[in-house]
Image (spheres, coloured by chain):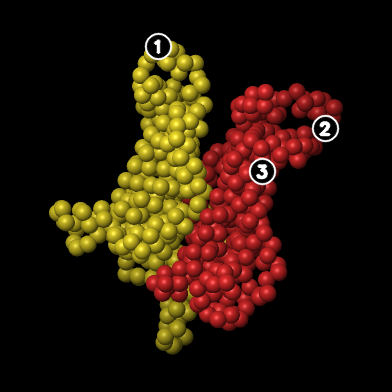
Amino acid sequence: MLRATIRDLFRFSLSFRFGSVILMIVGVLLLLSFFSPFESDDRRVVPRNKPPSAEFILGTTGNGQDGFWLLTFAIRNTLMVSGVAVLIGRSIAVMLGMITGYLGGKTDRVISSIVDSIIVIPRLPLLILIAAIMQGEMTVLSLALLLGILDWAHPSKRYRAMILSLREREFTHTAIFSGMNAIKVVVQEHLPFLIPLLLADAVAGFLWAIGMEVTLSVLGLSDLSTPSIGTLIFWGNYNHALLRRRVWILAAPIAASVLMVVGFYLVSLSFSEYLDPRTRLSRLTVEE
Amino acid sequence: MNLFKQFILPRFAQWLIVIFVGVTITFFIPRLSPVNPVTEALARVQMYQTLNPEAVQMLRETLLDLYGLDGSILEQYINFWKRVLKGDLGPSLASFPMSVNQLIGVSIGWTIGLLGTSILIAWTLGMTLGSLAGYYPNRWWSEGLEKSLITVYPVPYYILAFVLLMAFTFYLPIFPLIGGARGTAAFTWEYISSVLHHGFLPALSIVIGATAHRFIMAKALTTTEKSSDYVQYARMAALPERKVLFLYVTRNTLLPQVTDLSLSLGALFGGAIIAEFVFGYPGIGTTMYTAINNGDYNAIMGITLLSIVGIATASLLIDLIYPLIDPRVRYR
């Protein structure tokens, strides 16, 4: 089933083909970080400020770090932060969506109006406020937690809508009449239907979390001693890489971030296209 | 009366909830943190000079009073509300004699000018291009446009802005690196042109990002709307295509776009912070950044609060003028 889906996606969706190849490259870079000859906090292990060459393909930094290996660490950390954030955010969203969607009635109205209020609240100023207060004590993990806690309102509304419609379906009644309790119905019967939506949604979460990681880091509000896409750019700016004509220091993280988000976005695009019944119909007619 | 009760009142209640949640969050977050601003401020003072213990004690009390940190947490909360309702955001901690209100007052005009213009341009541009691309999906220009905007859309705003900055102030220095204008404010062509010159690049960065978002949405909506029966009839009646698209199809897709405009205001405000930080624009975002660097919690809190209230109010207003835009939404 899964293999057939991926095969279909590969065959019919140009964006999936591009996206998955890009993500594969990002994945290889991430895995390479485990084989790095240097530790991520090693300094002065290579000559400083060398432009890209055969020996150092992405040049070296002012701290004497190898640009390429540093970038692999940065990709790993950024993806880890966004991964944890996505996991936390989606868990909260799924739980809330299930509760409000399934219970309905007054509970739904109260929670929904609170969620609607929270959606309006701009998250970046809030993030900046929290991060500024925690300044110096921010770790990679706390950043991930923070991002996760702030990213559930939009998805929870989508899941709620989905559960609302599932609740009216025949099999829900069958399950209830055969004595299943509410939690079991929701988890065993409804959750599987949410998974495709969850998948497409998780990608959107990645995009947001990567963007926020970069944003907070360049403002100097994250854990600046851990290499991540954002902190690489921060230190590049801090050391005036542009004015000193050391563009490679900035170009590598910028290119990596663009690669990452575009890859994720293309894959999510193909997912949502694939899930859309109308395009599925047109796919069927293509096959004829 | 019915109109008031069933249409305006629920929306107004929602607005109040947002403000309440926003104020409560901005109140509690700083208090949950392990960092005590009073100790921090005292440490900053004592970094360069030693004070005698009595002076320190007095300073501590003054600061506690100033930050609204004396009394139980409930008392503080009520006092905070009292202050907020009076529109007083407290003193700025970093540039002390100035209040946060003054700090915001100096910079808010720049932000509103920059954001207002770019949002308007981006919305119109995205709607027009997206509708056209959705209506004529197989033309070379619509495919080219879609592919390029899809690549731009997910790129974090900071990266986009920074690349523009690198390209147009460093490698191709046609725009100024920082600032909002040259010379003193006056109604002369020289001053106005310098405002435009300085604002162009930050505005461009916001417009590109926002247009991509609007384009993708408009295209999807138009594609759906295009298959409606009335479009078929209109075409059969040989109405001019341009008329069908802009007078019928686009008008029907307007509703979700207007809702989204109010929601994306929040995201755009975030964009403005970064835009101003990157381009050194003298708006509220730069004030926020300075406040972060100086540990000026009061200013950060004030700006956060202001952005929450501002966005909630903007979305309330958009909600209320809805029925003027789309007659299908009656004042129910």
Q: Which chain is red?
A: A
Give whichever of B89, A11 is nearer the camera: A11
Residue name at image x 42 percent, y 85 percent: B48
Name the residue type under label 3: Leu
Circle 1 marks a residue in which chain?
Answer: B
Chain where mark 3 sits: A
Asked if residue A46 can be seen in this view, the reply is yes
Mark 1: few/some/many CA within 10 Å (<14, 14-19, 20+):
few
> Would you place residue A68 above or below residue A144 in this image?
below
CA–CA distance in space, label 2 to label 1: 56 Å
| CA gap, disc 3 and disc 2 | 27 Å
The residue depicted at 21 percent of the width and 54 percent of the height is B193
Residue shown at the point (60%, 35%) measured from the top left: A273
Q: Which mark is residue B237?
A: 1
Extreme residue toward the front, this view: A54
In the current view of this chain or complex, which residue is farthest to the left?
B188
Q: Colour of chain B?
A: yellow
Q: Is residue B85 left or right of residue A235?
A: left
* Quarter of the image that includes the C terminus of chain B: top left
Q: Tell if the residue under mark 2 belongs to the same chain as the one under mark 1.
A: no
Dot 3 surroundings within 10 Å: few (below 14), some, or many (20 or more)?
some
Determine the chain carrying the residue at label 2. A
Residues behind callouts 3 and 1 on a single chain: no
